[in-house]
Amino acid sequence: MKRRRSLTHVGGLIESTGQHHDADLLAQALAVAPATDADNDPARSHVHGFHTYPARLHPLTAARLVKAFGEEGPILDPFCGSGTVLVEALIAGVPSIGTDLNPLAIRLAACKTRVRTATELEQLIAWASVCAIQADERRYAKAGASRRFSPADVALFEPHVLLELDSLRLGLAACEPPVRSDLELVLSAILVKLSRKAGDTTRRTRPRRLPGGFATRLFVEKTRELAARFTVLNRLLPPRRAPVTVLLDDATKLERLPPTPVAAIITSPPYVATYDYLAHHELRLRWLGLDPALLARGEIGSRTAYARLTPAAARQRWQKELERFFQAAGPVMKTDAPLVLVMADSAVGTVALRADELIAEVGRSSGFRLCARASQARPHFHGPTMAAFRNRPRYEHAIVLRKATPISPSH
Ligand SMILES: C[S@@+](CC[C@H](N)C(=O)[O-])C[C@H]1O[C@@H](n2cnc3c(N)ncnc32)[C@H](O)[C@@H]1O
């Protein structure tokens, strides 16, 4: 049974179907003011806005889903990306586990969910300043490069920016591990802005003319910003800290989880044929020395992998990839635990891949029952695939399934 209702008039009409209680909770989770992926978007408050990440979940949607479906804990987000669900679980005081195949995601999610004291935050800023002073000294002394730059870096950065980044990296290498790891993410957060890359998810470049010392100043500013974001987060945390575990693991295998079954899965899998996490993060992975081999082998839904497929073959491949995820998810969940997915429709050529239809199909055949769905129309601006949404708009869906109880042989 379908119901159309406008919840709070934010973000447009929400259509929901299925069990009323679940459907209402899903609709409320989707009823948020639209957010951009920009870090300074007010929706990306405290640590959510520290580092950009393609297709981040809206923090308010994540918070509402955690409260509605995950309060018992532990929650698993098997495609945790930058850790939005994990941060909201931390704020709600619910234990959580996040996995992803992208090593940058793992570093980010772990950084954002590791609570720090005010003293640790002061030390972080102090270390960033030390790195900056050393970088400035090397710049004044015209110290030159500490190593040979790759042709990709030479093409992407102005020579003086590359030298400053090189000096900052030398400084980071001398810091102790927890500080080093944070400062490497600070470096990662400013890399694209300092480069000729026009954005995270594009190969286009743009002219860039930055003054000497800019990269170093931005590095210190961004560290201060990170510390300030943590200070705000700290005020939101309950007195008893819920544990957060972050693991590099393939969501279609889930081989590294602790043995206790989870009480809920809340996640947003990749938007099929839309993003390429490996390609989008190639620059950052290289500068942080993170090994992309597992992501290269196991990323599901990537635009590159789907680029040459016919719409029928793309649908089939996406079904298979989702099926592998459902089959890995079932055994790690408690009986009747909710599996909550936030997914948008995508398109291959002029054919739409409807996330709600695919999930219903694949979920059922993988031992889950579909309980409810809420959907909200989202604009689609991409020229070549626009025709796919001529008849029915592109929707973002929040869907809840539950593991079907096995039928005992006596029945
Ligand atoms: C839509 S993003 C998740 C964003 C996240 N909810 C956030 O707010 O940052 C999808 C994630 O799936 C990850 N991914 C792709 N294939 C994967 C796989 N086989 N196993 C685990 N993660 C995978 C990508 O690296 C990406 O981080």
Image (cartoon, helix red, strand yellow):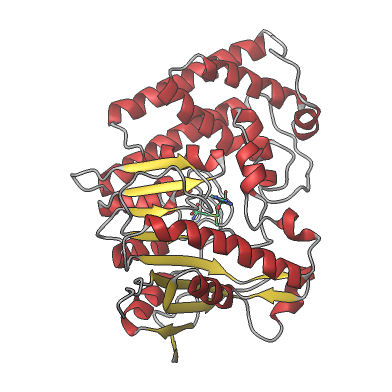
Q: Residue 333's x, y, as percent?
A: 36, 59
- Give x and y (percent) for residue 128: 47, 23
Query: Nearest the camera: 93 or 131?
Result: 93
Q: In the rendered view, would you say 357 is above or below 71?
A: below
Residue 271 seen in the figure: no
Measuring from the top left, give residue 286's x and y in whole percent: 66, 31
For the residue pair 45 and 301, the one nearer the viewer reads as 301
The residue under the point 40% across, 45% down is 257
| Quadrant showing the C terminus | bottom left
In the rendered view, would you say 69 is above or below 287? below
Residue 250 appears left or right of 392: left
Q: In this view, does 155 lie to the left or right of 38?
A: right
Asked if one can make out residue 79 in the rendered structure from this viewpoint, the answer is: yes
| Front one among 239 and 100 | 100
Q: Residue at x 31, y 65 (%)?
A: 335
Q: Give above or below for 401 relative to 197.
A: below
Q: Which residue lies furthest to the front in this view?
A: 410
Instruction: Classify the position of the N terminus by image quarter.
Output: bottom left
Location of residue 135 (image quadrant): top right
Q: Nearer the viewer, residue 350 or 186?
A: 350
Instruction: Identify which residue is drawn at 67% across, 46% down.
Output: 280
Q: At which x and y percent is residue 96?
A: 34, 49
Q: Is residue 116 left or right of residue 380?
A: left
Q: Give the image quarter of residue 405.
A: bottom left
